[in-house]
Image (cartoon, rainbow, N blue to C red):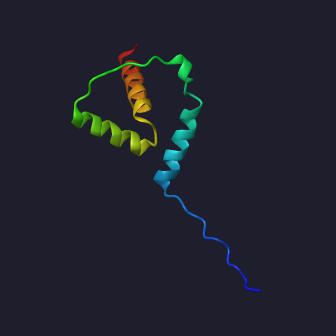
Amino acid sequence: MAIATNPKRKTFSEEEESKAAAFIAKAGEQKTEGNRKPTMIRIPPELLKRIDEGARRLGISRSAFIVQSAAEKLERMGN
């Protein structure tokens, strides 16, 4: 009978750990789809690429990125 070695455990970088923690923290803030209204907006292609990259880096959807960005902007404006 062969002796098997323990499988290697994946280690995560500090950045990956931070992203996971941010994702978990935001999970409680998400509203259900029933509370959202679909809308159509026009976004220049280069800006859309930047939005997609930002969303990918945060591990969230494009829609979530846009909603969070708008909410942060309104909060800074005092609305």
Kindly identify the residue that appears in the image at 64 percent across and 71 percent down.
Answer: 7
Hey, which residue is sitting farthest top in the picture? 79
Placement of the N terminus among the 4 image quadrants? bottom right
In the rendered image of this protein, does residue 24 appear above or below residue 41?
below
Kindly identify the residue that appears in the image at 46 percent across and 38 percent down.
Answer: 60
Which picture quadrant has residue 31? top right
- Residue 48 x/y as whole percent: 28, 35
- Residue 15 x/y as whole percent: 46, 52
Placement of the C terminus among the 4 image quadrants? top left
- Left or right: residue 13 versus residue 8 is left
- Left or right: residue 34 versus residue 49 is right
- Residue 29 x/y as whole percent: 56, 27
Kindly identify the residue that appears in the image at 55 percent across and 43 percent down.
Answer: 21
Kindly identify the residue that appears in the image at 54 percent across and 33 percent down.
Answer: 26
In the rendered image of this protein, does residue 4 appear above or below residue 33?
below
In the depicted view, which residue is nearer to us: 12 or 43?
43
Which picture quadrant has residue 42? top left
Hey, which residue is sitting farthest bottom in the picture? 1
In the rendered image of this protein, does residue 69 appear above or below residue 5?
above
Q: How many marks?
A: 0
Hey, which residue is sitting farthest right in the picture? 1
